[in-house]
Amino acid sequence: MTPAPADRLPSMLRDRVIEILKEQGLDHRPGELVKLSSGKQSSVFVDVKRALARWADLQVAAEAICDEMRRAGCDFTVVGGLTMGADAIAIAVSQVENARWFLVRKEPKAHGFKRIIEGARLSTGDQVLLVDDVVTTGGSIFRVYEEVVKTGAQVVAASALVDRGGRAAEQFADRGVEYLPVATYQDLGLDPV
């Protein structure tokens, strides 16, 4: 289960990310429901891409993810996730940690080598951190998990900038993977989706 905010160690970086998300990423639509990638609907859309469109804000988010991983003792050599939600995050985290990055396409490329994983070539011995901007049910991040496991690489941890549903932690625990979202729906003052 996702740790409640009070159960987590304090982190100035984490607090700053929550502040950035609240100020720049919450799109309230009273009386209107927005369909999320999970298929669920909400009157509040968390627009992480908009919130982190400035490098300084994206860098703070990447440092917060890396800080969470260090605190948990999760070492990784490669970071990545599903394109589009993970693109900027994966590349920023790779810079902060000097790790390699990869992105998983939604469909294999139709030409060339027809890859589904772009960027770093994953193989046995790689320790992978999965990232995503927002996790509600976990569909996107678990799709990436399956693709990574096929390569022989080991998924050691996963992180989302926002966990909107609180369900992914149990699924990751069942797979033996540490799941450390930077912010939860509680942190942002939202109802779970």
Image (cartoon, rainbow, N blue to C red):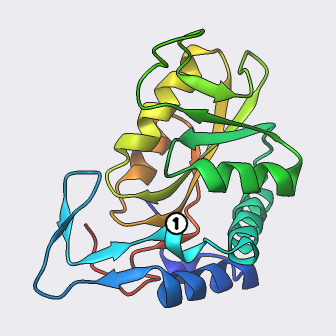
* Residue 173 vertical position relative to residue 62 in the rendered view, above or below: above
Count of all numbered marks drawn on residues in the image: 1
Q: Would you name the residue on which mark 1 appears?
A: 49
- Residue at the extreme front of the image, as rendered: 111
Question: At 48% across and 87% down in the image, what residue appears?
Answer: 22
Asked if one can make out residue 3 in the rendered structure from this viewpoint, the answer is no
The residue at 73%/21% (across/down) is 121
Q: Is residue 169 above or below residue 107?
A: below
Q: Residue at x 54, y 83 (%)?
A: 6
Return the x and y of residue 107 as percentages of the image width and height.
41, 24
Q: Nearer the viewer, residue 170 or 44?
A: 44
Compared with 136, 123 (above or below) is above
Q: Which corner quadrant of the image does residue 78 belong to?
A: top right
Q: Position of residue 106 (x, y in %)?
A: 42, 31
Quarter of the figure with residue 43 = bottom left
Residue 170 seen by the camera: yes
| Left or right: where 11 falls relative to 27 | right
Q: Position of residue 37 (x, y in %)?
A: 29, 52
